């Protein structure tokens, strides 16, 4: 069974540009979450999508957005990039029902390393 | 206040010895779950072990066990018989119940473990 696939693995962008990251979850998983990982802030929750709807959202500005398609693949978009957006962006998928069970395991991809210059 | 606290500096352990990685948490929710993840240099977060707030026994998964002390709000990871491949960052994370979708994982800052041959 294929794991969570994130593309691209590495990305370099210039301040002010926008970027789109892609995540293909494990087959059958309908929940996809996104996290930002930086040395200073650690891992922070961005948002979660379930059945094409945003179900949960972290404390990030509106420049960060996402969507999920009918095949559960998800994309996240960051507009007007800032230097501080440089980070490892991790996607996690979960086998889930309408409300996540407490012990539901999140399966992570290898991440997309974004560098903003 | 931080929800997950991992304060140990980089940890070192001799191969084949046991090591304990500390984690304390803060929540007022009676229903929560605690996770430990391993992140090697490749970036992917690998699930290790789970402990539910209502679980009566400490969780074990192979060489990993969780020393859960609910009154002290601590959930320390014990790795027995350390191997060179255990060298990585280790993250403690919590999922809280509440009335939401439970999808968010809150992570600690992580601990770097180095296994010496």
Image (spheres, grey):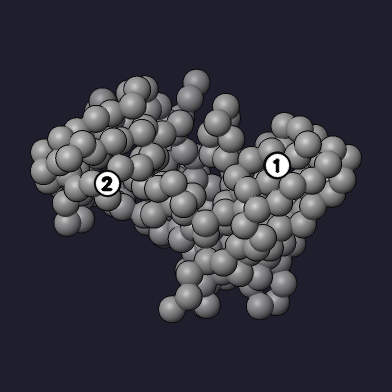
Which quadrant, please, contains the C terminus of chain A? top right
**Observer-nearest residue: B21 or B1?**
B21
Place residue A66 in its image quadrant: bottom right
Please state the horizontal and vertical placement of residue B101, each as a whole percent of the image.
55, 54
Measure the C-alpha gap from mark 1 to mark 2: 28 Å
Q: Is residue B10 left or right of residue A49?
A: left
Q: Which secondary structure, mark 2?
A: helix
Chain of the residue that carries numbered disc 1 in the rendered image: A
Q: What residue lies at 30% left-to-right and 35% top-to-bottom?
A: B113
Q: What residue lies at 28% left-to-right and 28% top-to-bottom?
A: B11
- Circles 1 and 2 on the same chain: no
Residue that mark 1 sits on? A115
Place residue A116 in its image quadrant: top right
Q: What residue lies at 32% left-to-right and 31% top-to-bottom?
A: B23
Chain of the residue that carries numbered disc 2 in the rendered image: B
Which quadrant, please, contains the N terminus of chain A? bottom left
Please state the horizontal and vertical placement of residue A6, each as a whole percent of the image.
60, 62
Neighbour class for label 2 at 10 Å: few (<14), some, many (≥20)? some
Q: How many marks?
A: 2
Circle number at residue B86: 2
């Amino acid at each position: 069974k294929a794991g969570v696939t994130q593309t691209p693995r590495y990305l370099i962008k210039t301040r002010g540009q926008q970027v789109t990251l892609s995540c293909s979850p494990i087959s059958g998983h309908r929940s996809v979450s996104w996290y930002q990982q930086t040395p200073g802030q650690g891992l922070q929750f961005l948002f979660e999508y379930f059945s094409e709807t945003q179900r949960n959202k972290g404390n990030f500005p509106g420049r960060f957005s996402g969507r999920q398609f009918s095949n559960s693949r998800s994309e996240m978009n960051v507009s007007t990039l800032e230097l501080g957006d440089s980070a490892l962006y991790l996607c996690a998928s979960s086998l889930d029902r309408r409300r996540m069970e407490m012990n539901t395991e999140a399966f992570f991809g290898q991440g997309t390393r974004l560098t903003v210059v | 206040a931080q929800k997950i606290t991992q304060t140990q500096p980089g940890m070192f352990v001799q191969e084949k010895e046991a090591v304990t990685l500390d984690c304390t948490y803060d929540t007022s929710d009676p229903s929560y779950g605690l996770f430990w993840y391993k992140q090697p240099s490749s970036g992917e977060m690998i699930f290790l072990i789970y402990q539910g707030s209502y679980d009566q026994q400490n969780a074990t998964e192979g060489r990993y066990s969780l020393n859960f002390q609910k009154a002290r709000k601590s959930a320390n990871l014990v790795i027995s018989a350390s191997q060179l491949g255990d060298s990585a960052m280790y993250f403690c994370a919590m999922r809280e119940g509440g009335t939401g979708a439970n999808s968010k994982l809150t992570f600690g800052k992580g601990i770097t473990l180095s296994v010496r041959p």
